[in-house]
Image: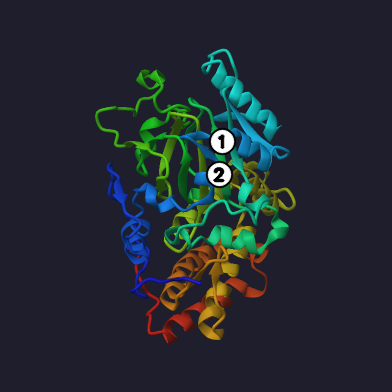
C-alpha cells in the first residue's frame, strides 16, 4: 500500500485569518507534503487539473460523448432508491427533498432534455446519494492520496453499524443548484466532476456575515437581488465582500476548505463525486463549531434548566441540529487517537480506503491535533457541568495523558501554540 507521510512531525495547526480571494490550479504531480502544508493547514482552496481523475472507471462508464450515459447508469443502478431535491421548492433555507427510483429519475432527466429544459417542469437534483457505501466493490473511482487523511470516513467505514458515511454522488440536469451553505460539521469537502461543468461561488470565512439579514439569517441565494434591500441586509456591500467565482470543468477536483460558505450551479448535465472529511488540520474548527452549537442550544432552552435530564436533552437537540453531539464527537476522537497510538506503540498499520497507510510523522501530527482538542474539550465539558455525562471514569484525562507521554517520547514537545 502507498504510504502517506509528511516531512515535519513538529507541524501543528494554526489560525489562518487571511482572506483569500483567488484559487490555485494544481497538477497531480504536487507532493502530498506540499498539498498538506500549503492547502490543508493553510485552509486554502484549490482545483486539481483533470488528469487527476483520468484513470477513474466512472469517467468512462458514466460518460457518453461528454454527456451522462443514461443507459449505463440504469443498468448499474436502475433499481436503487435515490435522494432527490426539487431546486424550485424552498424548504426553510434548503430545498424540498424526497426519494425516487433511479430509473424514474433518469427517465425524468431524459424527458427534461427532450423538452429543452422547459421552465414549467420540475428541476430535480439527485444529491447526497451514498453510492460508494451501497456498492463497495464497484470500480467507480479511487480516492486521490491528497484526500487520504479522512478521519470522518475512516470512522464510519470501520463502524458499518452506523449505516452512514460522507461519500456521495450528485447528478442532475443543467440548471440544478445548491443554495448557499457551509458543509456539515464545518468539514472539508472535495468534489470531482465526472461529466459536465459547475460554477462555484466560494466565500472565505467571515464573509458570510455580509450575507445575513437583520435577524442573522443567511440568504438562500447569494446572487439574489434581495441583497440590495438595505433595510433587510444592512451589512451587505458588494464593493467590499470577497469571494471566488470559478468554473469547474470535467475531470477537475475542487477542494473546499473548512468553514468556507459556497453556492454551486450545474452549468450542464452534470455528475460529480463528493466527500466531506475531517482530519488533524481542521479538527479544531470542527470542535469549535460543535462547542458553539451546544452553547446556543443551552442558551435557547435555558428556561427549562430545572427539568430532569436537561443536559441529556441538550445533547439530543444538538445531535438533531448539528448532526453530532459531544458523546459521538468524543467517541470519534477516541477511535482516531487509539489507531494512531497503536501505530506508534504496537506498529499496527493505520489504513484508509483499503489503499493508503500513514507514516509515523503523520500519526504524530494527528495525535498533537487531538491533544489540542482534548484540552479544550475537557475544559468546556467541565465548565458546562457535563464532563461525567460524556466521559466515564476520567476517560478524556487518561487519553490526554497517554498522548502527551507519547509525544514526549517521540521528541515532540506537546506545547505548540495555536
Residue 145, given in percent of the width and then of the height, sits at 44, 62
Residue in the foreground of this view, choosing between 254 and 62: 62
In this picture, is 363 found above or below 273? below
Q: Position of residue 196 (x, y in %)?
A: 45, 35
Picture quadrant where residue 241 is located? top left
Q: Which mark is residue 19?
A: none
Tell me the quarter of the picture where residue 414 sits. Answer: bottom left
Res 69 label: 1
Q: Position of residue 8 (x, y in %)?
A: 33, 74
Is any part of residue 135 visible from this angle? yes
Query: Which residue is situated farthest in the left direction here?
Result: 239
Closer to us: 56 or 179:
56
Q: Residue furthest bottom?
A: 409
Does residue 401 appear anywhere in the picture?
Answer: no
Crowding at label 1, few (<14), some or many (≥20) Cα neighbours within 10 Å?
A: some
327 above or below 316? below
Helix, strand or loop at mark 1: loop
Q: Which quarter of the image is occupied by the C terminus?
A: bottom left
Which residue occupies 40% across, 49% down?
255
Tell me, yes or no, whether the two marked residues, 2 and 1, touch with CB atoms within 8 Å.
Answer: yes
Horizontally, residue 311 falls left or right of residue 371, namely right
Q: Position of residue 243 (x, y in %)?
A: 32, 37
As drawn, the residue found furthest toward the front would be 65
Which residue is painted at 58% across and 71% down in the image? 396
Q: Secondary structure at mark 2?
A: helix
**Foreground pick, 127 / 93:** 127
Q: Is residue 127 left or right of residue 38?
A: right
> Circle 2 sits on which residue?
61
Tell me: residue 65, above or below residue 334. Answer: above
Query: Taking 231 as reference, is 115 left or right?
Result: right
Amino acid at each position: 500500500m502507498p504510504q502517506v507521510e509528511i516531512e515535519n512531525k513538529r507541524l501543528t495547526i494554526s489560525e489562518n485569518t487571511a482572506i483569500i480571494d483567488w484559487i490555485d490550479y494544481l497538477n497531480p504531480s504536487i507532493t502530498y507534503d506540499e498539498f498538506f502544508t500549503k492547502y490543508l493547514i493553510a485552509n486554502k482552496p484549490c482545483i486539481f487539473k483533470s488528469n487527476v481523475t483520468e484513470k477513474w472507471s466512472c469517467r468512462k462508464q458514466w460518460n457518453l460523448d461528454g454527456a451522462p450515459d443514461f443507459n449505463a447508469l440504469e443498468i448499474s443502478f436502475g433499481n436503487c432508491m435515490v435522494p432527490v431535491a426539487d431546486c424550485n421548492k424552498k424548504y426553510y433555507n434548503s430545498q424540498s427533498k424526497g426519494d425516487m427510483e433511479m430509473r424514474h429519475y433518469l427517465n425524468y432527466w431524459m424527458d427534461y432534455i427532450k423538452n429543452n429544459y422547459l421552465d414549467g417542469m420540475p428541476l430535480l437534483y439527485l444529491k447526497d446519494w451514498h453510492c460508494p457505501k451501497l456498492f463497495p466493490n464497484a470500480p467507480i473511482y479511487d480516492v486521490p492520496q491528497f484526500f487520504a487523511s479522512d478521519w470522518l470516513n475512516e470512522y464510519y467505514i470501520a463502524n458499518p453499524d452506523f449505516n452512514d458515511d460522507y461519500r456521495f454522488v450528485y447528478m442532475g440536469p443543467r440548471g440544478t443548484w445548491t443554495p448557499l451553505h457551509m458543509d456539515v460539521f464545518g468539514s472539508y469537502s472535495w468534489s470531482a466532476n465526472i461529466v459536465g461543468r459547475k460554477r462555484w461561488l466560494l466565500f472565505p470565512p467571515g464573509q458570510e456575515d455580509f450575507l445575513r439579514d437583520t435577524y442573522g439569517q443567511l440568504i438562500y441565494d447569494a446572487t439574489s437581488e434581495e441583497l440590495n434591500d438595505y433595510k433587510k441586509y444592512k451589512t451587505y456591500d458588494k464593493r467590499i465582500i470577497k469571494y471566488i467565482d470559478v468554473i469547474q470543468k470535467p475531470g477537475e477536483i475542487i477542494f473546499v476548505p473548512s468553514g468556507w460558505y459556497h453556492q454551486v450551479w450545474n452549468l450542464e448535465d452534470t455528475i460529480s463525486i463528493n466527500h466531506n472529511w475531517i482530519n488533524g488540520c481542521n479538527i479544531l474548527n470542527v470542535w469549535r463549531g460543535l462547542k458553539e452549537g451546544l452553547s446556543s442550544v443551552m442558551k435557547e432552552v435555558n428556561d427549562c434548566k430545572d427539568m430532569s435530564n436537561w443536559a441529556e436533552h441538550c445533547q439530543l437537540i444538538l445531535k438533531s441540529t448539528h448532526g453530532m453531539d459531544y458523546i459521538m464527537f468524543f467517541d470519534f476522537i477516541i477511535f482516531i487517537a487509539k489507531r494512531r497510538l497503536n501505530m506508534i506503540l504496537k506498529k499496527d498499520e493505520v489504513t484508509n480506503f483499503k489503499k493508503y497507510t500513514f507514516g509515523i510523522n503523520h500519526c504524530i501530527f494527528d495525535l498533537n491535533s487531538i491533544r489540542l482538542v482534548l484540552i479544550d474539550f475537557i475544559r468546556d465539558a467541565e465548565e458546562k457541568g457535563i464532563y461525567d455525562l460524556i466521559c466515564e471514569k476520567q476517560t478524556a484525562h487518561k487519553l490526554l495523558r497517554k498522548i502527551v507521554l507519547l509525544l514526549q517520547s517521540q521528541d515532540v514537545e506537546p506545547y505548540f501554540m495555536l
